[in-house]
Image: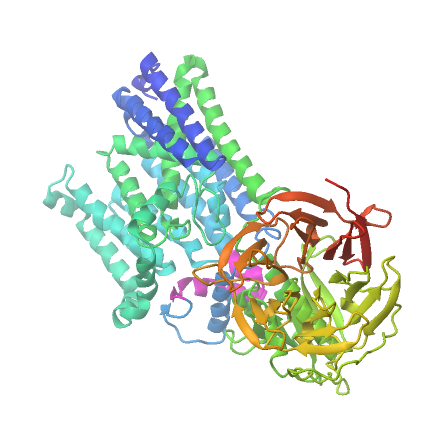
Amino acid sequence: MEAGNSARPSGARLGFFLTSLILAGTAQYCLAFKWQVGLAAPLWLAALVLFAASLWWAPAGQRTLPRPEADRGNRHVELALALVVIALGIFFKVHKLDEFPPGLNHDAAWEGQYALAILNGIPYTPFISAAWGRETLTFYFRAPFVWWLGNVPLAVYLPSVIAGCLFLPFLYWWVRTMFGVRVALLTTALHGVSGWSLVFSRTGWRSDFQPLFTILTCCFFWHGLETRKTWPFALAGIFLAATANTYNAGQAFPLVFLLWIPVFALQGWTLRGFLRRYGWQLLAGAVAFAAAIAPLAWYALTNWEKFFGRQTYLLQQYSRLSALKDTLLIFHYWANGDDFFVNTPGLEYFAAVLFPLGLVWCLVSLRDPRAQFLTVGFIVGLLPGLMSKPNMNRDIGTMPFVYGFAGLGAFYVAEELARITPQLWRRAVAASVAAALVVGSAWATYTQYLGPTRRLVWGYYPETTVLGQYLRTLMPTHRVWVTSSRFPTETLIYLTYQGGDPFTAAFTKYEDPSELLRVTLPKPGQRGLAFVFPDETLALLVMAELRNRYPEHEIVSLRYPPNDSGRIFARVLLVPASNSAKPAEPDTAPTAGASPSGFRVTAGQADLASLAEPRGVAVFHDGTIVVSDFGHDRVVWFDSALHPQFAIGGTPGVDPGQFRQPSGLAIGPKNELFVCDTWNHRIQVFSKAGEYLRQYVADLFSPRGVAVTRSGTLFIADSGNNRVVVLSPDGTIVDRWDGSNNGGTPLREPVGIVVDEETSTVYVTDNGMAAIRRFTLSGEDRGSFAIAGLGVRALSEPQIAWATGGNLWVNVPHAHEVRLYNPSGDLLRAISVKREGNTVEAMPMGVTEDRQRRRLLVTVAENELLALPLKNP
């Protein structure tokens, strides 16, 4: 180190420098951990101004960017340190590869599908318009791995892992060539342990290869500038074309050279001298680039609309002002990703602090061609995001330059802090500070992505991967139907592929599970049938109907993590292959109109006291209690002491008095019982004595809640159709509404419903919105209030009932509570629902208040009817 560089900083400059570090650290803490942009913005601005001032007033030797010739030391030590930082980075690329990524992203799976098509002999093309338009170069990298390993997730993302590992030594070489050994070590170490590098080495995306080809281009271009040899420029041209062939964001990268080379040529060169020194070499690079880019360029020229279709669409979807705002925050506050970096900064804490410091150092030293190259590369790397929607994958071209700035920032901080200490300790202090920055970054990344308490990284679809791997075992022996949009189709197609067209699914998929009840399903023959349902209420109700149609079946529960403690995310109904196994024919929908009154059906074989997943509960004025015995397809009468009296139903069917999994109940003005016959898609009406009176059919689909006004008008929560249906007493349809009147939010799985005739207000439990919604009688939105614990999943069926004083009871099954709210949404009371001597939590499914006996009647999924005493609050 030169003598001028070792001088102790002045008090004022030292104060500026230390204050800038404190402000930068505090600002980044506010952004990354407190999400306080308004506070962080002025802190960051002040930090950068003070840091620039400390640089500006520094002696010339300390302000100048480090030069490689100043780092000539022991080559063996350098090699050992370089191997250590590269090995550290490789460790972060490959450690726990069997656990992270936990699944296969849908875009990565599509790359796997195309790799299968390549192995099947699809004609070569440099670009395809399918799936938003994609360059095909990286598909050819993946094809040998798919051939070697088969259509498994590892075959898709292992090439990305290799690309991430190869990036590290070339990053070290490039930065060492420009700034010397110490900056190269810091840059490579910070990049190697970064979450950005770790994630984008394991996604299986085309963009994973862009940083590798970008750094290869920079390496050989800079090597050519130093040596004046032709072959490095030719290689740089080839890798520049490869960068443009990986991902559409990479097509901006050639601008770096178009902008920087003229600026470089004008600094200290005559045009003749510059051309004499680099003319033939640059020509060789340009020719190599033109030859390598020719197939893609020809496709773009002859298929202009297809090639630029995605870019054109994105340009129209995002304003430039919004893009600029998101770009300013992307590395420090919100990475704005649709996958992976969804709600986190793009950089870990230390890198986020160091990167702006290195950038300011380069801006202060902008006369230096190296600072110009880094700055131009960084700006060009931001252009794809600025011209569309900024996120970490579109801005992946900035990665080498961002960490180049971070390495410079770390170097400057370490050196400046070392200058405060006595001369004898400075080398050790600088090394310790640098090591601490790397270790802190490594710890942060390991904790977030690889440690035992790692955060959930959205975008890998682990449940879909488990499902796809399971379905592959079924394909030879079963025809498969998959319901729900939760399972990306591309991932399932790739994982279940067993030959033929890799873009054609070997299964039938419906996003709406109820479609299975609207189509003609086959009989099991030489192959069995397999129906996949997500763990959501509507889907499981459909599965229950299929269980009736196919009496011979098996149910398999799929979990993630795939062990006994994992959460069930899907259930598979397996019907065995048997030519003799015939499904029950689908029942014809019941028609409107009343059947003869007085029809009564006795209970089935099940003991009256034995309930199975009971749902609705209602109480007559004399204390008689009625429960919809969901699992036994019946309705059971109890006396006020909770002793069972009789039941109707018991055998699933469509005849009057028969049910298919009844749910919601209501008592009408004439002491009549209204029953939501859920999977017969109708409302049946009975007398208090259990005599069948009439039914209502109004194009309903799986209704689960009903309310009856004093005039006999019915308000029905038509759950499967996501709406409310209003019927007159004679069955005429008065109205249908879904809550979207006058710009309101549409209902999503309404379950419970009550009507306040005094205020003309309809209250509906909206399971999908996790709220109680208020509407006028004609469906106009009057607001809502949230009910924590609700959600579209199995057994989340929030019924609602009137309470004393005009308040509302609502059951929240997964919270094991029944809650009391006033009409304004204030929580008045929460009652924990327990059974077995008030020791075991239970899931409440139905609720009603027995006012005369001051108790709450609650049915629980654990097959019981409970009476909970109501005490005065």
Asked if 356 appears above or below 616 in the picture, the reply is above
Quarter of the rendering occupied by the C terminus: top right
Residue 757: quarter of image? bottom right
The answer to which of 788 and 335 lies nearer the viewer is 788
Q: Does residue 93 appear to the left or right of 752 in the view shown?
A: left
Q: Residue at x 70, y 65 (%)?
A: 666
The answer to which of 218 and 135 lies nearer the viewer is 135
Residue 273 point in image, percent of width and height: 12, 43
Q: Does residue 284 appear to the left or right of 525 in the view shown?
A: left
Asked if 807 appears above or below 57 in the picture, the reply is below
Dominant secondary-structure state across the stretch colored magenta: helix
The answer to which of 330 and 473 lies nearer the viewer is 330
The verdict on residue 675 being magenta is no
Residue 837 point in image, percent of width and height: 87, 47
Q: How is the image coloured?
A: rainbow
Residue 79 point in image, percent of width and height: 46, 36
Q: Residue at x 56, y 41 (%)?
A: 448
Residue 267 point in image, percent of width and height: 16, 38
Residue interval drawn in magenta: 132-159
